Amino acid sequence: MTLPPYADLLGLSVDPDDESVLIMPFEKGVLGRPGFLHGGAISGLMEMAAIVAVRQALAEEGGGRIKPINVTVDFMRGGRDKPTRAQGVVTRLGTRVANVEATAWQDDRGKPIAAARLNYLIARR
């Protein structure tokens, strides 16, 4: 699957063990305060993971286009200087709107560093 251009800016890659998980390396471009990820980079990672999830769900139904409606992000703990993973899960794929939940974690998937709820307007092909 082709990732949006912003994914390149964040240095994102697809996890070889699970195509629904994105990995963001810790590097200077995603640095916030010393030793920690910037909240915008974490949010961007989760948005890209949500887009992947919606595109995969739409592909199963013949494809379509998406447009973001809103995004809500909850930061739970600071992202440290290590790779960060994120996955989006479509909780509802309606006729016109898709609801997605995304989480970002580092060492332990059960202890996310952030979570997001995203809604997309969808136009099916």
Image (cartoon, rainbow, N blue to C red):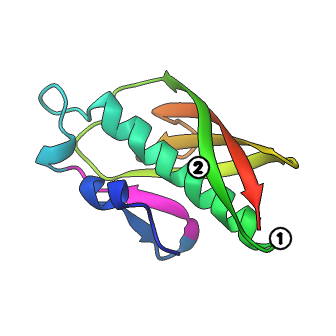
Looking at the image, can residue 62 be seen? Answer: yes
Dot 2: element: helix
Residue 55 occupies which quadrant of the picture?
A: bottom right
Q: Contact, CB < 8 Å: mark 2 with mark 1?
A: no
Q: In the rendered image, which residue does mark 1 sit on?
A: 61
The answer to whether residue 93 is left or right of residue 39 is right
Residue 79 horizontal/vertical position (percent): 33, 34
Q: Main secondary structure of the magenta part?
A: strand
Is 49 situated above or below 118?
below
Question: Between disc 2 and disc 1, whose residue precedes?
Answer: 2
Q: Residue at x 23, y 50 (%)?
A: 26
Q: Residue lying farthest right?
A: 95
Give me the disc on residue 26. none
Q: Give the image location of residue 66, x and y in percent.
A: 64, 52
Where on the picture, by quarter, is residue 33? top left
Relative to the observer, which residue lies in front, 96 or 103?
96
Q: Is residue 20 left or right of residue 61?
A: left
Seen at 65% across and 59% down, the residue is 65
Under mark 2, the amino acid is Ala
The part of the image, by quadrant, that contains residue 4 is: bottom left
Binning the other alpha carbons within 10 Å of mark 1 as few (below 14), some (14 to 19) or many (20 upward) gives few
Identify the residue at horizontal 19%, vertical 30% (top origin).
32
Give whichever of 110, 60 is nearer the camera. 60
Q: Which residues are magenta?
A: 19-26
Q: Nearer the viewer, residue 68 or 10?
A: 68
Q: Does the stretch in magenta take in 24?
A: yes
The quarter of the picture where the C terminus appears is bottom right
Q: Which mark is residue 50?
A: 2
Task: Compute the Cα span from label 2 to label 1.
Answer: 17 Å
Q: Between residues 117 and 114, which one lies in front from this camera angle?
A: 117
Which of the two marks, 2 or 1, is nearer to us in this view?
1
